[in-house]
Structures are given as C-alpha cells and as structure tokens.
Image: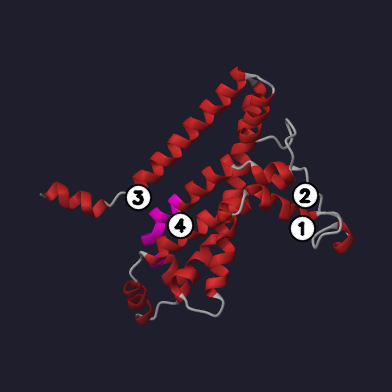
Amino acid sequence: MSSILQTLIHTVLWASLSTLFAFSLSLPLGYALARFSFPGKRILATLTSLPLVLPPTAVGYLLLCLLADHGPLGRDFLGLDLQILLTWKAVILACTVMSLPLVIRTTRVSFEEVDPRLEKMSLTLGIGRIRTFMTVTLPLAHRGLIAAAILGFTRAMGEFGATVIVAGNIPGHTQTLSSAIYSAQQAGNDGRANVLVAVALVIGFIAIFITEWLGRDPSLSSRRRAL
C-alpha cells in the first residue's frame, strides 16, 4: 500500500508541475490567439494542437529524438548533458507537452467569451493594456481558466504513451499511476490494479464534476429562479 501511496503522491506532484508549466504557456498564447490577428496565427494554432491528434507514443519518440545525445538538445550538440531522459523531469516534460493543446484551446475559448467591448472601454478610460488584462479580462474569464487548468491536470494524470518512452516505468522514480496500472496488469496483480484504477476513477470524477460546475451559467440559473 505504501508503494501505491508513493506512486499517487509522485503522480499528483508531477501532474501539478506540468499543469503549472502548461498553464503559464497557455495564458499568453491563448490570449494572443483569441484577441489578435498576426502572420502565422493558423500555423501556430495548428502546431500547438498537434499533440492532441498525434499518438502519444509518436510525441514521446519525437521528444526522445530531441533529447538524445545526438539530438538538437542532446549532449553532442549542447556540449552538456541536461540529464532529463529516464528521470522525473522527463515525466513532467511529457505530461506538459501532452496536456498543452487541451489547456491552450480551453484558455483561448475562455478569452473569446469575454466581451471585447469591455476591454475597449477600459482602454479608452486610459487604463493600460496589462492592467486591463489583469482587472477586466482575467476576472471575467476565470471560470474557464480554472476549468482549463483542471483539464490539463487530469490529462497529465492519465498520460502514459509519451511518458513511458522518455521517462520509462521505474517504480519509485518515474512510475506514474498510469504506468503502475499497466505494470500491475502485466504482472497479473489484479488486486493492485483494481486499487490503482479506483484511485484514478475517484480523481477523474472529482475533476470532471468541478469542470461541469464551472461550466454552468450563473446568469441562466438566476433567471430561472426569478421565474
């Protein structure tokens, strides 16, 4: 049971860090895609969504080629070893790349739902763009942004294909909830697999429930109560 707890703690920690990285990248990217027109916008949107349609193992293979000794970020090219492969850092990298498209798309939709006239009113009052973003856009989009972070976290929690290629499946070091379920099933340890699946179900249910709650329309509920 202690190894299951350790695997769960590792998975939650790594998924949280990857969500933090993915959300930090998604905030400016999602806002830029929602509000501005610029050359290469469609190409950027396509590239950031690509991991969503590629097999996770293909993404893992590309990351492996990128970080291998002879790759663009490898020891031979950089002159130093980043020591990412087969470590917990590789788990976070794989989870970040795989959850990034989902977080960016949800973040973009959240910003698109904010009425741009409110931002223009703020700007015409002499309030700067950054302050407008912080005091008008972010508060109005906060429900969608929280939902984006939760979806990114759940995607990172369930990541397997890319993670197992670049980080392996080393118990106590790089093993996640998903890879632990795979190992238990392969070993015929149904009891351990059932416990791990139950934990994954509980976490997934809570995450989706919160996302559904955030997606409700408070104004619609108010109108219904008024009727």
Task: Work out whether residue 171 or residue 222 is closer to the camera in this orientation and state it.
Answer: 171
Q: Within 10 angstroms of label 3, few (less than 14), some, or many (20 or more) residues?
A: few
Q: Within 10 angstroms of label 4, few (less than 14), some, or many (20 or more) residues?
A: many
Q: Which image quadrant for residue 54? A: bottom right
- Earlier residue among tags 4 and 1: 1
Predominant secondary structure in magenta?
A: helix
Circle 3 residue: 215
Q: Which mark is residue 106?
A: 4
When the figure is inspected, residue 85 is found, relative to residue 136, above or below; the finding is above
Circle 1 residue: 66
Task: Work out whether residue 196 or residue 141 is closer to the camera in this orientation and state it.
Answer: 196
Bounds of the magenta segment: 135-147
Residue 12: image x %, image y %? 59, 38
Q: Which mark is residue 101?
A: none
Marks 2/4: CA–CA distance: 29 Å
SS assignment at label 2: loop
Dot 1 amino acid type: Leu
Pointers 1 and 2 in contact (CB under 8 A)?
no
Dot 2 amino acid type: Ile
Asked whether residue 93 appears in the rendered view, the answer is no
